[in-house]
């Protein structure tokens, strides 16, 4: 379970002060698929970064599976990124010098685990890229790159996947394909928190949280994964 | 896949940037290698000169001068010992000199190694003028005085012949074929030397046997010049050996002018190396600059690595590995450039010297280059670890 207690994030000081998040509290069950909606500047990316330990809240607590993660030091955050939480970004954020397979193996390189190419190949097969493993990111389409980045997130078997506008750079059809993949991962037991501004994409989640001006404006529960 | 492989793949993608960083290393390393190579060539040349010019050792009779005093009053000096060395000691001297050289160079060869040139000096009058006549072993003497050139006539070929120094010939008005009376014996002038600028110009050289007989000094020599024939030969050890084992003689290792030149050379080398050190430091700042740019360009990549689980020390490793690659590339290029530079500049400094390439400097160049590259990377790598993942993506 992920518990967020009154987190605030304030950038800058004085006249230039921007309140990105204002005392947001939330509980998300383990293994649920939640989308975070809201217009630009509503604080949704900041919200996601704080949950994932990429950014620290100005106030408040983030508790993941019973442990606070908002005040962890660098080394402990590294441990969290190596097992519990993985990211999927709008810009895919693959290393351009590595092939699809190598990008998927990268988390294993850093965590010092044995390099299980079979596992990586299996995951690439699952995300539908079994035939493109030797291609560099520049040789892949946006949808394919995002599949690589999802495979990379999965290789460390995280309990929670954080996705920041995962379909933001894609056409509608490709975006839907990626969402079907997310839906499948959710059914396999992965928790997913996804930020998006696209209501259709948000509709794939079990639950939709709407942020506005740094606060939760609405929380909509949707039965059974939404439209297909 | 290992982390260093990730780095190598990344370096391959950014070849130009990496070469540019390596350039900073190349400049410093090339200067060091160039200076060392030229200095080595200079030393070799000075050694050559040492080889060419004169004996390494002189053996003279052991004469001690005792100051005789009565209270504060000096009664002059008293010479103790003989003025000559017996020829019988020559084989012993040869045995010690050759023995030490064999030991130093680890050679088994049985023949004679050192050049042993005995001399007998007699001050006599020719045509009423005082002149120094030197008895020599002609074949040995010519090996020591490699710079001798005959102006007229030819070298001494047998008994009863003389070789006359340039100034002596002029003063005594001697020509090839003239006879010189020496205490009853007669020697014919076989040749006249070109001017050498040394004492030789004022001397007359005759076979030692002729001189010994004419002046009743049979079996006696005034001094012995020894040349050890090699740079590594242990002249000091030979001198000690002779002094300890042969009574009545004193052997002195001759300090050459070349040795002073060598000292000068060493000072120059140190000065040049200091300059090279500065070049290295300047190059280092160049590399720091390039690496800072590299960090900046790769903020996103660093963020990605951090997001997928890289620790700070792993980010440092990424940059250190890159520094090692830069060092290896820079070291190799630096060695090649430095050697080429030495080839171009060396002959200008030491005329007529061919500069050899020195393979031993390659590991040195690599070591220097890698140290410089790693040193230059410490701060940029530290900066890289301070990058926050969220910021790294926001900035794009």
Image (spheres, rainbow, N blue to C red):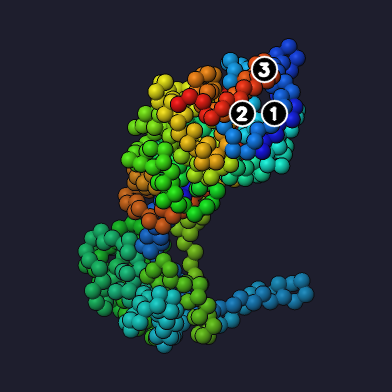
Q: How far is the residue under mark 3 from the one under mark 2?
A: 16 Å
Q: Residue at x 41, y 46 (%)?
A: A122
Dot 1 or dot 3, earlier in sequence: 1
Q: Provide residue B290's location: percent of width, then percent of height.
A: 50, 33
Determine the image quadrant of residue B40: bottom left
Q: How far is the residue under mark 1 from the one under mark 3?
A: 12 Å
Dot 3 or dot 2, earlier in sequence: 2
Q: Are marks 3 and 2 in contact (CB under 8 Å)?
A: no
Q: Residues within 10 Å of mark 1 (few under 14, many from 20)?
A: some
Q: Secondary structure at mark 2?
A: helix
Q: Which residue is mark 1?
A: A26
Q: Secondary structure at mark 1?
A: strand
Q: Secondary structure at mark 3?
A: strand
Front residue of B378 and A21: A21
The answer to whether residue B303 is above or below residue A226 is below
The chain containing the residue under callout 2 comes to A
Q: How far is the residue under mark 2 from the one under mark 1?
A: 12 Å
Of tags 3 and 2, the one toward the viewer is 3
Q: Which residue is mark 2?
A: A48
Q: Are marks 2 and 1 in contact (CB under 8 Å)?
A: no
Q: Which residue is mark 3?
A: A217
Q: Is residue A47 visible?
A: yes
The quadrant of the image that shows the C terminus of chain A is top left
- Work out whether disc 1 and disc 3 sit on a shared chain: yes
Of tags 2 and 1, the one toward the viewer is 1
Determine the image quadrant of residue B278: top right
Q: Is residue B341 visible?
A: no
Q: Provide residue B99's location: percent of width, then percent of height.
A: 42, 82
- Work out whether disc 2 and disc 1 sit on a shared chain: yes
Q: Residue furthest right?
A: B71
- Work out whether disc 3 and disc 2 sit on a shared chain: yes
The chain containing the residue under callout 3 comes to A
């Amino acid at each position: 379970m992920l518990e967020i207690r009154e987190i605030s994030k304030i950038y800058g000081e004085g006249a230039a002060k921007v309140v990105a998040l204002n005392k947001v509290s939330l509980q998300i069950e383990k293994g649920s698929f939640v989308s975070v909606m809201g217009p630009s500047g509503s604080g949704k990316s900041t919200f996601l970064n704080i949950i994932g330990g990429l950014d620290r809240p100005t106030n408040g607590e983030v508790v993941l599976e019973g442990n606070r993660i908002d005040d962890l030091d660098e080394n402990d955050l590294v441990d969290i990124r190596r097992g519990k939480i993985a990211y999927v970004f709008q810009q895919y954020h693959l290393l351009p010098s590595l092939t699809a397979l190598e990008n998927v193996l990268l988390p294993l390189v850093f965590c010092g685990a044995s390099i299980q190419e079979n596992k990586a190949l299996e995951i690439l097969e699952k995300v539908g890229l079994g035939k493109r493993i030797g291609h560099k990111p520049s040789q892949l389409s946006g949808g394919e790159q995002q599949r690589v980045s999802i495979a990379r997130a999965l290789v460390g078997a995280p309990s929670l996947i954080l996705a920041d506008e995962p379909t933001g750079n894609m056409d509608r059809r490709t975006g839907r394909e990626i969402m079907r993949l997310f839906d499948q991962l959710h059914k396999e037991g992965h928790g997913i928190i996804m930020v998006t501004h696209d209501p259709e994409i948000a509709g794939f989640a079990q639950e939709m949280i709407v942020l506005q001006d740094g606060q939760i404006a609405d929380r909509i529960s949707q039965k059974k994964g939404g439209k297909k | 896949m290992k982390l260093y492989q990730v780095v190598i793949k990344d370096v391959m993608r950014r070849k130009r940037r990496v070469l540019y960083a390596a350039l900073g290393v190349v400049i410093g390393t090339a200067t060091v290698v160039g200076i060392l190579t030229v200095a080595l060539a200079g030393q070799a040349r000075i050694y050559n000169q040492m080889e060419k010019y004169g004996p390494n050792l002189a053996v003279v009779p052991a004469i001690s001068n005792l100051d005789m005093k009565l209270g504060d009053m000096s009664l002059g000096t008293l010479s103790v010992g003989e003025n000559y060395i017996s020829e019988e000691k020559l084989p012993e001297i040869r045995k010690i000199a050759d023995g030490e050289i064999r030991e130093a160079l680890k050679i088994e060869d049985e023949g004679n190694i050192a050049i042993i040139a005995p001399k007998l000096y007699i001050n006599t009058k020719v045509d009423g003028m005082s002149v120094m006549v030197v008895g020599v072993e002609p074949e040995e003497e010519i090996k020591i005085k490699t710079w001798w050139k005959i102006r007229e006539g030819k070298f001494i070929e047998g008994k009863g012949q003389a070789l006359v120094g340039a100034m002596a010939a002029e003063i005594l008005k001697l020509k090839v074929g003239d006879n010189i009376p020496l205490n009853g014996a007669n020697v014919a002038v076989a040749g006249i030397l070109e001017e050498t600028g040394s004492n030789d110009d004022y001397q007359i050289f005759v076979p030692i046997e002729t001189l010994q007989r004419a002046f009743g000094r049979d079996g006696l020599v005034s001094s012995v010049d020894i040349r050890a024939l090699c740079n590594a030969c242990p002249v000091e050890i030979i001198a000690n050996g002779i002094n300890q084992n042969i009574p009545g003689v004193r052997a002195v290792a001759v300090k050459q002018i070349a040795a002073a030149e060598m000292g000068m050379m060493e000072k120059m080398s140190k000065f040049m190396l200091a300059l090279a050190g500065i070049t290295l430091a300047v190059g280092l700042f160049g590399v720091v600059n390039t690496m800072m740019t590299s960090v900046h360009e790769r903020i996103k990549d660093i963020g990605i690595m951090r997001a997928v689980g890289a620790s700070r020390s792993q980010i440092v490793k990424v940059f250190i590995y890159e520094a090692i690659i830069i060092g290896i590339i820079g070291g190799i290029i630096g060695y090649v450039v430095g050697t080429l530079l030495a080839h171009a500049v060396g002959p200008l400094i030491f005329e007529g010297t061919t500069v050899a390439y020195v393979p031993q400097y390659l590991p040195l160049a690599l070591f220097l280059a890698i140290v410089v590259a790693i040193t230059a990377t410490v701060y940029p790598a530290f900066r890289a670890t301070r990058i926050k993942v969220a910021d790294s993506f926001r900035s794009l």
